[in-house]
Image (tube, grey):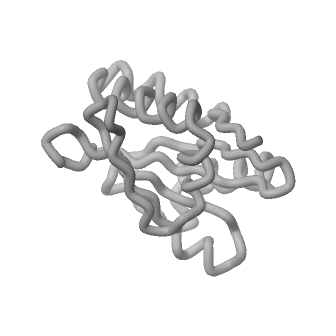
Amino acid sequence: MFTLSLAPGAQADLRRLATTDGPAAAMIVAVLQEIQGDPSLLDALTIHDFEDVFPETEHDFNVKHWWEHYRKGRNLWRLKVIDSKRSLLRYRVIYGYAMREQAYYVLGIVHRDHCYVTSHPDTQRILREYFEYCE
């Protein structure tokens, strides 16, 4: 059975976001709860270009590889949250998949303009947690 957890860095990101953009933080939490409660949606978190519309909510989401790292054999992904007006949220949910455990770990919540280069401090933190929880 698949599981979804927030790593400590993502928990801190979410707390910070709640103080600066409460509605966005609430929307991310709502989407993650919807995913967590539906095994077929959890399974879809490793399908590149997967997009889902929740019939019972106003939120959609889209899944894509984090290509730079996926090409290196790392199971890293990013999730875009789309609101009821089909507008993209200004934040991305970065997560990894631990295949042996069948567990997803949310590793970070970053601004959509996040600098994904490996030298960026937030990317380094996300990668550290990826290696700790997903490898």
In which quadrant will I find the C terminus?
bottom right
Instruction: Give x and y (percent) for residue 83.
Output: 23, 40
Q: In terms of depth relative to the viewer, which is nearer, 111 or 102? A: 102
Q: In which quarter of the image is residue 63?
A: bottom left
Residue at 41% x, 61% y: name it. Answer: 115
Outermost residue, left direction? 85
Residue at 42% x, 67% y: name it. Answer: 49
In which quadrant will I find the N terminus?
top right
Q: Taking 116 as reference, is 53 left or right?
A: left
Instruction: Give x and y (percent) for residue 114.
Output: 38, 55
Residue at 32% x, 37% y: name it. Answer: 55
Residue at 42% x, 34% y: name it. Answer: 31
Instruction: Give x and y (percent) for residue 46.
Output: 59, 61
Instruction: Give x and y (percent) for residue 87.
Output: 17, 47
- Above or below: residue 42 compared with residue 23: below
Q: In terms of depth relative to the viewer, which is nearer, 62 or 26? A: 62
- Above or below: residue 135 compared with residue 102: below
Q: Quadrant of residue 25?
A: top left
